[in-house]
Image: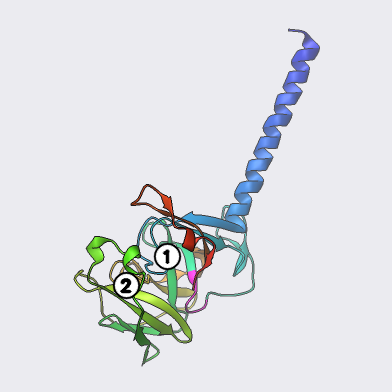
């Protein structure tokens, strides 16, 4: 091969590889520090989030992190009670999505699936169950759905009456810089009742919407009504 052609190909290849590397770095940096979406494989956040939902996560909701790390470059807000957040589990580092129930300084307790915060029991109203059956597997037939008022933030929670679960625990105080997380599907969620408090630095961002939803049990059929719906 002619020497000039070899040189041209070498320069072109280096340039092409460099462009690909830069593009990949930009794309992954965006996902790491600014915004991302996550596929939800379990029902621990039913009925708010169901299996097969793709949720959008705003990683700038609370702070700006250095890409690929949990180091905060700048912070401007903290998670609030009722926020749905994505975080790395303190148990094994797996990425989870749960709801913030307790913030630093809160005293949290639970008695028969009724949460108390700072000595005051939350209110629970029975929810309209219409449409809930389609979001619940046959194994969850003894389910009930309630509207929980999390100190001003109302959202749905679900209990499964015939499933063994941790429905009560004694008062715990949330330490500074930590949060108490729970799944909305209270009887089918591995959360702070089991792995303890979540460090602020482990929180990756706030989940704000369902972008796409696919029914995993029915050949990944789209759940059109769930597309682009806000998470409450």
Task: Report the residue marked by disc 1.
Answer: 49
**Closer to the camera in the image, 157 or 205:** 157
Quarter occupied by the N terminus: top right
Classified by dominant secondary structure, the portion drawn in magenta counts as loop
Q: Earlier in the sequence, mark 1 or mark 2?
A: 1
Numbered range of the magenta stretch: 80-84
* Within-10-Å neighbours for mark 1: few <14, some 14–19, many 20+: many
**Along the horizontal axis of the image, is 34 left or right of 39?**
right
Frontmost residue, 13 versus 82: 82
Residue 25 placement (x, y as % from top left): 64, 44
Give the residue displayed 67% in from the left and 31% down from the top. 17
Which residue is at the far right? 4
Question: Residue 11 at what x, y percent from top left?
Answer: 76, 24
Q: Position of residue 23 (x, y in %)?
A: 67, 42
Closer to the camera: disc 1 or disc 2?
1
In this figure, which residue is indicated by the disc labeled 2?
A: 186
Report the residue that reaches farthest toward the bottom: 120
Residue depicted at 38% across the width and 67% down the height: 45
Q: Within the magenta stretch, is there residue 16?
A: no
* Front in this rendered view, residue 163 or 47: 47
User: Measuring 57% from the left and 52% from the top, which residue is drawn there?
Assistant: 68
Quadrant of the rendered structure where residue 129 is?
bottom left
Q: Residue at x 23, y 67 (%)?
A: 141
């Amino acid at each position: 091969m002619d020497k000039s052609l070899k040189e041209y190909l070498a320069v072109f290849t280096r340039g092409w590889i460099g462009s690909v590397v830069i593009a990949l770095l930009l794309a992954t940096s965006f996902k790491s520090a600014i915004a991302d979406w996550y596929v939800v494989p379990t029902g621990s956040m039913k009925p708010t989030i169901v299996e097969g939902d793709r949720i959008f996560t705003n990683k700038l909701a609370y702070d700006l992190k250095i890409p690929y790390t949990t180091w905060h470059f700048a912070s401007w807000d903290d998670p609030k009670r009722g926020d749905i957040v994505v975080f790395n589990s303190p148990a094994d580092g797996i990425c989870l999505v749960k709801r913030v129930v307790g913030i630093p300084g809160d005293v949290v307790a639970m008695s028969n699936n009724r949460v108390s915060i700072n000595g005051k029991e939350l209110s629970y109203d029975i929810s309209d169950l219409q449409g809930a059956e389609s979001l619940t597997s046959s194994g969850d037939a003894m389910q009930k759905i309630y509207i929980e008022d999390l100190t001003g933030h109302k959202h749905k929670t679900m209990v499964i009456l015939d499933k063994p679960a941790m429905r009560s625990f004694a008062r715990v105080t949330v330490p500074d810089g930590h949060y108490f997380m729970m799944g909305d599907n209270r009887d089918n969620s591995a959360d702070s009742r089991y792995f303890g408090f979540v460090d602020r630095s482990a929180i990756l961002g706030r989940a704000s919407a369902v972008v796409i939803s696919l029914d995993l049990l029915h050949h990944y059929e789209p759940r059109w009504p769930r597309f682009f719906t806000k998470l409450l």
